[in-house]
Amino acid sequence: MKVLGIETSCDETAVAIVTEDKQILSTVLHSQVKEHMPYGGVVPELASRAHLLFIEGLVEKALDEAKTSLSDIDAVAVTAGPGLIGGVIVGTMVGKGIAAATNKPFIAVNHLEGHALTARLTNDVEFPFLLLLVSGGHCQILIVEGVGKYQLLGGTLDDALGEAFDKTAKLLGLGYPGGPIVEKMAVTGDANKYDFPRPLLDRPGCDFSFSGLKTAVFREVTSQHSALSTQHSEFKNDICASFQRVAGDILEDRIKNAIEIFKNAHPTGETMVVAGGVAANKYLNNRLNTLCNSLKMKFIAPPVKLCTDNAAMIAWAGLERFRLGLIDDLNFEPRARWPLINS
Ligand code: KG4
Ligand code: ZN
């Protein structure tokens, strides 16, 4: 079985073809980073136009690289939300068009379910598993009980972690997207130089709050003393390293609680998965890996290219849904908002 996946919910136009035996026959992508770079973040109207411009060529390229044709595809899976609505509409309409023209099933995939199920494509993870979903727009801890079966343990009360990375990078004039740059700068920084706040630490539950951390970084960067040093890379490296260490402290504390809840609910469950763009971060993954080892949990982070937005994860989530007979109507309306627990 082969499924064609399309992803256009943010600033990546992506198409992939994935098989039931977990082969990624092709995964092609146009990153719009250059288009949005001058604005320091994603401009929705520019994003939709770029999706429209590139999507058709990428579908052809994905078919070519997979050495297949539309007639050999078994189903078409598309990110139908959540995301920037212009982009979601472009991808959904293209997917529906292909499905209608070829008379193939159409599957509306929740972008977050794409991230959530990636580890089943890359690592043979069995249900149930514990999931930390950390991206530019989301920060949640869930128990994944099955396809479309999610129990939310906690989420952010304000900013997503990827957003905090992006804002820190922007404050330091490091460009966009911020996560990879902050991670790189942090390598040579002093992680103990600044002691930023860790809201909710040691409290029960699995909720997050990152706005206090963001504000503290803002204060440090704009303080009179720091303003003089913002040109110095040593200062920037120290801010990045300290920010990342505190982000790690917060994640560790929340995940510790989540593992306890997960083990009580599922005594035989043994895997913790991290997914979403921030799961590309090696420093945070190392810390979570160490924590999981100490609590006798397996820790899995998909390869970096499958953590950040891509279409292989959408094709795979579509394939999992298709196998269960979860097919959608061509009237399915694209959704700007779509909580994972309603997938
Ligand atoms: O999943 P994703 O590609 O798009 C969304 O669905 O939001 O996640 C993008 C987010 C951005 O905030 C980006 O800065 C962050 O993931 N990110 C990282 C890293 N790579 C990407 N954050 C921390 N460290 C990284 N290496
Ligand atoms: Zn994403």
Image (spheres, rainbow, N blue to C red):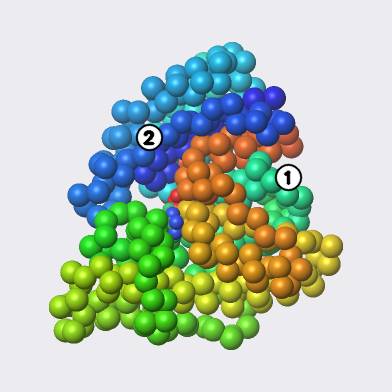
User: Does residue 204 lie above or below 99 as drawn?
Assistant: below
Is disc 1 surrounded by few (<14), some (14 to 19) or many (20+) residues within 10 Å? few
User: Farthest residue toward the front?
Assistant: 188
User: Does residue 187 lie above or below 260 as drawn?
Assistant: above
| Residue at image location 37% in from the left, 82% down from the top | 193
Within the image, what quadrant is residue 154 found in?
bottom right
User: Farthest residue toward the right?
Assistant: 268
According to the picture, the residue beneath numbered tag 2 turns out to be: 30
User: Does residue 71 lie above or below 107 as drawn?
Assistant: above
User: Which quadrant holds the N terminus?
Assistant: top right
Horizontal arrangement in the rendering, residue 139 relative to residue 86 (left or right): right
Q: Nearer the viewer, residue 82 or 117?
A: 117
Can the viewer see residue 333 in this picture? no
According to the picture, the residue beneath numbered tag 1 turns out to be: 124
Could you tell me the amino acid type at mark 2? His
| Position in image of residue 161 (x %, y %) | 45, 65
Could you tell me the amino acid type at mark 1? Asp
Is disc 2 surrounded by few (<14), some (14 to 19) or many (20+) residues within 10 Å? some
| Residue at image location 25% in from the left, 68% down from the top | 233
- Disc number at residue 34? none
Q: Nearer the viewer, residue 234 or 70?
A: 234
